[in-house]
Amino acid sequence: MSQVIDRSTLASAAFVRGLAHGEGAPTLIWVVDPALTAPGAGPGPLSTIAAELDAAGLRSLVAETTFPREPKVAQVDALAAEIRAVSNPIVIAVGGGSTMDGAKLAAAVAIAPDETLTYALSAVEYRGSPVPTVLVPTTSGTGSEASRTAIASTAQGAKLWFWGEELKTTAACLWPELTETVPAHFKAVCGFDAFAHAHESATGNNRSPEGVAFAATAIAHLCDHLPAYVRGEGGDAARLTQWGSFQAGEALNLGGTTIGHSIGHALGSVLPVAHGHAVAVVTDATITLTREGAPEAYADLERALDRGPLDAVWRQLRADCGVSLGFDGSASSAAALTEAACAEENMAMRVNTPMTFSEAQWAGICADIMRTYGGSD
């Protein structure tokens, strides 16, 4: 499991120095979601920490590259170049899944002159230990702060996955107060993404007892605390939703994802539907289908969770959060969604799905999604 720290540890110069790989004083490279106030750009919690570390002799730089939406391969290449230009760097990424994915992927790529695409779909192994990273999530759902996966898109919009131990952060800073100002709908769909990570990793063909244990803990926390977090409660609601997201990320490491992410990635590539929203749509559309079609795949998770059929658990969580999953599908089609879902970059997730579907069945599922949730054929 990733090392977990809190805000006070992140502000500790001794801790941060201990992360460095090289000799001499490290330089901190802050990769910050553009919606946040970066260190030195004005008053805020990040400026406060950077000032404390600076006073202890640790220099900070703010990366020019940011990730306002899901990372593009070219953006990751740009950040990797920034990292290579710094002596003894430590990357501190503060933001949602886009920022964390982009930063940790760049930190792994930066140790060699290769372009990011070299490593897509695990085509080759990374060249060595990555630049040290600290990931500070400001949303609760992607699990990037725990997982050894990242997503980046090509210029054509195809979502590519990247995997490796090198993508697992050096430390995850869980600072739940940073997540409390996220809009309610975004809180919900991010939490639904965490549910999908737990559900898919514990019911896919690569499931394991260890993954089921992480997944059951994650889903329990999400069911118990996500609705209150969506309603605007802080405290335990924010803290334990974030912990559920982290646990789901650990489950993801062990079991991978299935149909929800295969079609979810495809939906996000053919339409401007945010990742968590897209995955929630596919979960809603397929969880009963896969549970009824492969009940043996669900048995261990349902036994560990002890809350009844998982599709009923999902429906209750969605109702408790009170958000719509509809989207505007008029700019694409079921055929385009099917083609994207069956593309090479989504094959591993299709293979991990506990049911085997024919091409016609995949097409039917995609058509149902576009019609039911997108109002389009």
Image: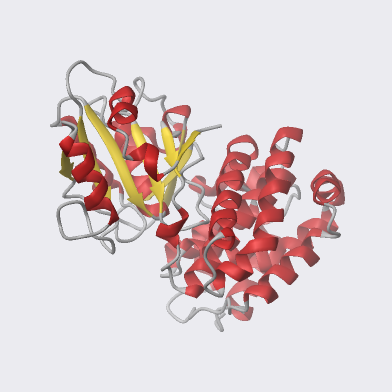
Q: In which quadrant is the N terminus drawn?
A: top right
Q: Position of residue 122 (x, y in %)?
A: 46, 32
Quick check: 231 above or below 127?
below
- Tell me where residue 214 sits by quadrant: top right
Q: Residue 287, position in %: x, y?
A: 73, 61
Q: What colour scheme does the image use?
A: secondary structure
Where is residue 137? Give x, y as percent.
42, 51
In this picture, residue 293 sits left or right of residue 326 = right
Percent from the top left, x then y, of residue 17? 28, 25
Query: 222 or 53, which is in the foreground?
Result: 53
Query: What residue is drawn where x is 28% and y is 23%?
Result: 20
Of 81 and 366, nearer the camera is 81
Could you tell whether 99 is left or right of 338 in the image?
left
Closer-to-camera residue (37/325)? 37
Q: Can residue 99 be seen by looking at this rendering?
A: yes
**302 in relation to 34, above or below:** above
Q: Which residue is drawn at 54% across and 70% down?
A: 233
Image position of 175 with respect to 320: above or below: above
- Residue at 42% x, 78% y is 331
Q: Can residue 81 be seen in this view?
A: no
| Image quarter hosting the C terminus | bottom right
Rendered view: 122 above or below 343? above
